[in-house]
Image: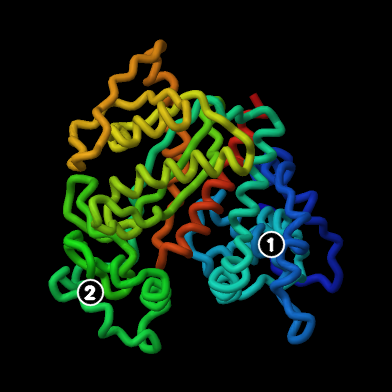
Amino acid sequence: MGSRQKAQGALFYEFSIEAHVPLDHMLRSVDRFVDLTGIRRHLAAFYSATGRPSVDPELMIRMLLVGYIMGIRSERRICEEVHLNLAYRWFCRLDLADPVPDHSTFSKNRHGRFRDSDLLRHLFETVVARCIAEGLASGQRLAADASIIQADANRQNSTPKSDWQPGSINPEDAPRAVREYLERLDDAAFGAASSVEPKFTSHSDPASQWTGARGGPAYFAYSTNYLIDTDNGVILEVEGEADEETILGIVFPPNRSIRQSEVGSVQTMIDRVNDTFGLKPERLIADTAYGTSAMLDWLDQQRGIAPHIPGSRHRDPRPDAPPQPRHHHPGRELPVAREAPERSFAKGRSGAPHHQHIKQRGGQFLMSSGGQSLMSLDNIRAR
């Protein structure tokens, strides 16, 4: 039997975090592709020259990446793990004696300068541009799908559509999510000028949609939409909300219909990919939720994109709706082509947290997708 191990603190230590992080650690691989040099320049106009010293924004972004890559949902937990884990400290450029920011710092920046500067979209597009430059995404063959993310709201704290009176809400007494929703939508968007109203409206998160899309008990949720390059499963675009749409004089508010939100978001994402990266897809793979006559006509006639989409069984009720086109395009290797995007969805969903509001959710989706694309870079380059 050897001698008993005793904890005895030394006066001085010779210690290198670099030497204690394995060479094959995932964060080492991801770190090769993380370029955050432009963050400070992007945020320069949103920081004051006076006041207390601020937390380095690059440090906060690296900590958020650790959370999404390693599946840590809570920001409070992220701070604890970065404080304890040497690999996380190494990735965040923290020495042993460097303090870790308080978890409240993330909330203040997420609702403040990160949102005002659209920083998270800037970072996401930087990652996508790197994937395109590395030849991992051509933008020719795309797949689209949506995920239903449960909102942080419950049925007990909601109001039936007949009792929903937004005009009686005092914005000064309302939670942040309600205040921002009231600022964002006018009376028509609440259904005042429309026969289309939500079945239930959440008091804590009125932007969420009451849905039973998964076939079980209904709940409040959001629809998150992804546009993926099928070459290597790289996420090219993310959209967490849809614009208002008027059909036959009826105003459909954002996220008031999961199916409407999916179709409108895909159109937004395709146009945004073209405007941002100059990508003009040849074909789009999607499920029946996108198989409406209007959507197929928009793809084939207006954008020149071959739709690999099963026809929807739901007939468009509009009298001026175009007839359901019947496209025939060679190569019905649809199940094989969908393997890469479905694998990407399976990974991306595993770390999807509950969120408080759709604007916050948009940033969360971008960070999650950016982290997924960074891991795709490493996995594909290692083959």
What's the residue type where badge 2 is placed? Answer: Asn
Disc 2: CA contacts within 10 A as few (<14), some (14-19) or many (>=20)? few
Q: How is the image coloured?
A: rainbow
Q: Is the residue 113 above or below the residue 85 in the image?
A: below
Q: Secondary structure at mark 1?
A: loop
Q: Residue 114, relative to residue 311: is it above or below? A: below
Determine if residue 112 is in view. Answer: yes
Q: Position of residue 265 (x, y in %)?
A: 41, 46
Residue at 46 percent of width and 64 percent of height = 359
Mark 2 lies on a secondary structure that is helix
Q: Nearer the viewer, residue 68 or 183?
A: 183
**Of the numbered discs in the image, which one, if any, rests on residue 25?**
none
Tag 1: Cα neighbours inside 10 Å, few (<14), some, or many (≥20)? few
Left or right: residue 353 versus residue 166 is right
State the residue lying farthest toward the top.
Answer: 330
Where is residue 41? Give x, y as percent.
77, 62
Query: Badge 1 is on which residue?
Result: 5
Q: Is residue 84 visible?
A: no
User: Which residue is more in the foreground, 40 or 70?
Assistant: 40
Labels 2 and 1 touching (C-beta < 8 A):
no
Query: Which quadrant would residue 17 be assigned to in this image?
Result: bottom right
Q: Which residue is mark 2?
A: 157
From the viewer's perspective, tell me whether residue 277 is left or right of residue 172: right
Classify residue 22 as left or right of residue 108: right
